[in-house]
């Protein structure tokens, strides 16, 4: 006998265990209108063999049988791996509480009292078969869900590994490129000191070399910052923004003055929960972005604010610059995504990607509200100190 064999009708099979033909007849008649296959056993050994082979959806079990009782047979069924989950309904002439309790103790799920009645048997069996089908469906759905969770976890792990490898490569390549680039910039600086002995074509070439080298240096610098963002162990502490914003204002003081930009701090600045270094880096990139993409005419304005909205601290940097078309609102946070040529607006296309990556690392998000010619507002949502989980 192959204990692993399972017939196609196992979900709809009912095994009746009774040594009395009259009882068997009533049960069989009761089940004829139900969509089930019926199997019969007249003693314990036959019942164990058929239950192991058929794996029925339900067992109707007589309590009083010659040799092994129904209670003992139920214990054996529940002790075996392949039959322990099959629900058992006892059939007995005794309606005493002691017998019922014993039946439930050995693993039974219900009782049918003799003399059996067709309607009662049919209703009980139908109810338990419906419950059994629902349990099976839940098991299938749960197994599918577990597979999907495992697949998702594997995919996430692969993605994290790929991102780590990519960032490690970016860091290594960028770091290795800086040495020869500095040599180029150093020699260019030496040649520039002798520009007075060069003709105009040579000076133009030298200026192009110097400009390209500086652009490459800025790109490598931003790539290194992007690769480093979130790589170290991050802090999650209450951070006061006032000193950070003042430091950033001082950092950009010359650009603010030269461009005539009105730099406004909307006080009070609510504290945020995060990593001080990443918060500073986020603000540096957002203010730099606002200063870079200002309009050529009019008075540029930049404002920095932070307010608590529900349980989040929303850090905002707003400007009245050139703005961004709606179709680009998501793309601008991708690495190297630029909307303008280098000749129009300087930049590497990495600054906003650093902002998005820093926000994610701190459990936050970033979004932009903007329209061409109107300006932009970048909102970084972070946890607020004291907010619940």
Image: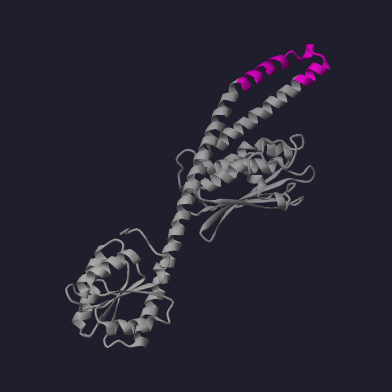
Left or right of 357, for residue 28: left
Front-most of 301 and 218?
218
Across and down, in percent, residue 306 comes to 58, 53
Front-most of 120 and 377?
120
Q: Is residue 335 magenta?
A: no
Across and down, in percent, residue 277 comes to 51, 40
The residue at 34%/58% (across/down) is: 4
* Prevalent SS, magenta region: helix
Front-most of 5 and 271?
5
Q: How many numbered markers are drawn? A: 0
Q: Is residue 147 above or below residue 126?
A: above
Q: Is residue 357 above or below residue 23?
A: above
The residue at 26%/86% (across/down) is: 114
Q: Outermost residue toward the right?
A: 200
User: What segment is highlighted magenta in the picture?
Assistant: 180-205
Q: Is residue 194 magenta?
A: yes
Q: Outermost residue toward the left?
A: 67
Q: Outermost residue toward the top?
A: 197
Across and down, in percent, residue 59 comes to 31, 73
Front-most of 121 and 320?
121
Left or right of 310, for residue 108: left
Across and down, in percent, residue 380 comes to 58, 51
Task: Indicate the quadrant where residue 126 lies.
Answer: bottom left
The residue at 79%/13% (across/down) is: 198
């Amino acid at each position: 006998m192959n204990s692993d064999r399972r017939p196609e009708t196992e979900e709809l099979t009912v095994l009746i265990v009774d040594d009395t033909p009259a009882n068997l007849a009533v049960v069989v008649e009761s089940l004829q209108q139900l969509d089930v296959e019926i199997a019969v056993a007249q003693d314990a050994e036959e019942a164990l063999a058929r239950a192991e082979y058929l794996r029925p959806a339900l067992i109707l079990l007589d309590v009083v049988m010659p040799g092994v009782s129904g209670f003992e047979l139920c214990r054996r069924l529940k002790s075996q791996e392949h039959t322990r989950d099959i629900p058992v309904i006892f059939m007995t002439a005794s309606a005493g509480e002691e017998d019922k309790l014993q039946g439930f103790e050995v693993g039974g799920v219900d009782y049918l009292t003799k003399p059996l009645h067709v309607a009662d048997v049919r209703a009980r069996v139908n109810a338990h078969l419906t419950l059994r089908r629902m349990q099976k469906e839940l098991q299938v759905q749960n197994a599918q869900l577990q597979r999907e969770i495992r697949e998702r976890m594997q995919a996430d792990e692969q993605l994290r590994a790929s991102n780590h490898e990519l960032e490690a490569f970016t860091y290594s390549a960028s770091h290795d490129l800086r040495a020869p680039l500095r040599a180029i910039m150093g020699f260019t600086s030496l040649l520039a000191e002798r520009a007075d002995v060069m003709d105009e074509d040579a000076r133009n070439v030298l200026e192009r070399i110097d400009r390209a080298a500086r652009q490459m240096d800025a790109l490598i610098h931003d790539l290194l910052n992007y690769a480093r963002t979130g790589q170290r162990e991050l802090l999650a502490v209450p951070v006061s923004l006032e000193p950070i914003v003042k430091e950033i204002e001082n950092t950009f003081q010359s650009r603010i003055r030269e461009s005539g930009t009105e730099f406004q701090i909307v006080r009070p600045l609510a504290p945020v929960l995060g990593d001080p270094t990443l918060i500073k880096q986020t603000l540096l990139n957002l203010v730099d972005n606002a200063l870079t993409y200002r309009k050529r005419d009019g008075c540029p304005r930049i404002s920095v604010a932070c307010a608590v909205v529900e349980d989040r601290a929303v850090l905002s940097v707003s400007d009245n610059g050139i703005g961004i078309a709606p179709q680009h609102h998501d793309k601008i946070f991708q690495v190297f995504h630029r909307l303008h040529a280098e000749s129009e607006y300087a930049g590497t296309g990495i600054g906003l990607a650093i902002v998005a990556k820093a926000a994610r690392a701190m459990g936050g998000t970033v979004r932009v509200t903007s329209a061409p010619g109107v300006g932009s507002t970048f909102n970084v949502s972070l946890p607020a100190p004291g907010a619940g989980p």
